[in-house]
Amino acid sequence: MRQSQLYTKTRKEAPADEVSKNAILLTRAGFIHKEMAGVYTFLPLGLRVLKKIEDIVRRHMDAIGNELVMPSLSLRENWEKTGRLETVDVLMKTMPANKVSEEKSSNSYILCPTHEELITPIASEYARSYKDLPIAFYQIQTKFRNEARAKSGLLRGREFRMKDLYSFHKDEADLQKYYEEAKKVYMNVFREVGLGEDTFITLASGGDFTKDFSHEFQTVVDAGEDIIYLDRKNNIAYNKEVVNEENAKRLNVDFETLEQVKACEVGNIFPLGTKFSKAFDYTYMDEEGKKQDVYMGCYGIGPSRLMGVITEKFADVKGLVWPASVAPFSLHLISLAKEKDSETAKTAEDIYTKLTNAGVEVLFDDRNESAGAKFADSDLIGIPMRVVVSDKSLEKGGVEIKERTKEESEIISIEELFATYKKNCE
Ligand code: ATP
Ligand code: MG
């Protein structure tokens, strides 16, 4: 993509109404636009990152479930059935906004913060026999929660993206087996987006679903709102909420010896048991034709929160730093040609065309700006590799390449650049 065609612009000043590092940098770099507290537009650059994250999540989830998309609007009755109409403290609803609308229909709907209330009735239509189980559905979709504190940018949205997966099993053992597999798949997702080393499976409260623990995936980061007790040796952590004498005995751990760190929950999985299947009278026929309870698990990841955590984790004083797997582009090509039809300008155009045609994702800074402004924007946007074409670089034999996280640059020939990025560029 040509930067001259990118409608959004970077800005030097931090937005006055933001306090979090992720919101400030992502706004300055033109990745997001704030609509209100906890509600953001993903601008073209931001959408590219969000899509990369969601594509990684999708690829891993396809191995363990079927993708679908459920609506955000749901019926009140479904929430009454599970009792969560009263107990979910972030639940929001819609209402007709004016008289004319109200005359058409006065219905009010629940805006889903999660989808157990919708998926359970769906699964019960398609999996009624032991032969149909286990099944698992997932979606990547927008969720709504009336969060009290929405000052953390993408870390805590009132409208945000979630991947939610739900699994249905014929007994607890089968749920457990799937649950353990899901843990592994989850860690692979966090590894692939660049957070593997800092993300820990964390025992947390099962909420009102289960007396067992749920498992959170907590990324160690200063901006995190949770405190975890980290046991690095055994590669496991405990959310502060479960740190008490009873659990110390139950788990045989001495919490006092563990490191306490700030972390952000990027994923959470729950063995739900029969809570939701019972609420919707969902049973299946076993081999003997007897009705049995269906066991459920639910598994969430927040792609938009992940984008915020990646920002918080890797950004430096100059701006954003994207891991290659989620970067909006692989390469930031900068032309410092002084005149439009100079040899240098033509060479830069040629490099852009060839790399793009070969499938390399290139952001091409073809704007009429100073070198200083272009370099500052490049650092702010945070693409992993910068390639500069200038009169000087061509005199020295090619282009100047520099990794976003390194200070030193080097000159390589144009052939070498093509060879590195795509063998079939020629
Ligand atoms: P938290 O404790 O941080 O409020 P939660 O436990 O309520 O989160 P879950 O219901 O487990 O969240 O949601 C699954 C995943 O969705 C979370 O692990 C997180 O990645 C993401 N998520 C939850 N709430 C938000 C939010 N308000 N903004 C952005 N992402 C969120
Ligand atoms: Mg959670």
Image (cartoon, helix red, strand yellow):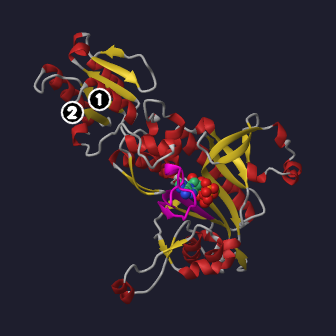
Tell me the crowding category of disc 2: few under 14, some 14 to 19, or many 20 or more residues within 10 angstroms, Cα based.
Answer: some
Q: What residue type is labelled 1?
A: Lys
- Residue at 55 percent across and 80 percent down: it is 76
Residue 39 drawn above or below residue 366: below
Q: Where is residue 136 in the image (x, y as percent from the top left)?
A: 57, 63
Residue 423, can we see it? no
Question: Dots 1 and 2: beta carbons under 8 Å?
Answer: yes
Location of residue 147 in the rendering, given as x and y in whole percent from the top left corner: 56, 61
- Given residues 193 and 22, the one toward you in this image is 22
Give the residue number, with chain letter if any, for mark 2: 367
* Res 255 → quadrant: top right
Residue pointed to by mark 1: 374
Q: Which residue lies furthest to the right in this view?
A: 249
Query: Does 99 sit above or below residue 231?
Result: below
Q: Which of 297 and 65 is in front in this view?
A: 297
Q: In this view, does 30 lie to the left or right of 339?
A: right
Nearer to us in this view, 416 or 22? 22
Q: What element carries label 2?
A: loop
Q: How many marks?
A: 2
Residue occupying the point 37% across, 34% down: 330
Q: Is residue 166 magenta?
A: yes
Q: Which of marks 1 and 2 is nearer the N terminus?
A: 2
Q: Tell me which amino acid carries mark 2.
A: Arg
Residue under the image location 54 percent in, 37 percent down: 313
The residue furthest top is: 396
Quadrant of the rendering where the C terminus is positioned: top left
Most distant residue in the front direction: 16
From where the camera sits, is residue 350 visible? yes
Q: Give the range drawn in magenta.
A: 139-167
Residue 216, percent across and down?
66, 51
**Quick check: is 263 in the magenta stretch?**
no
How far from the left and from the top, in percent, is residue 200?
66, 42
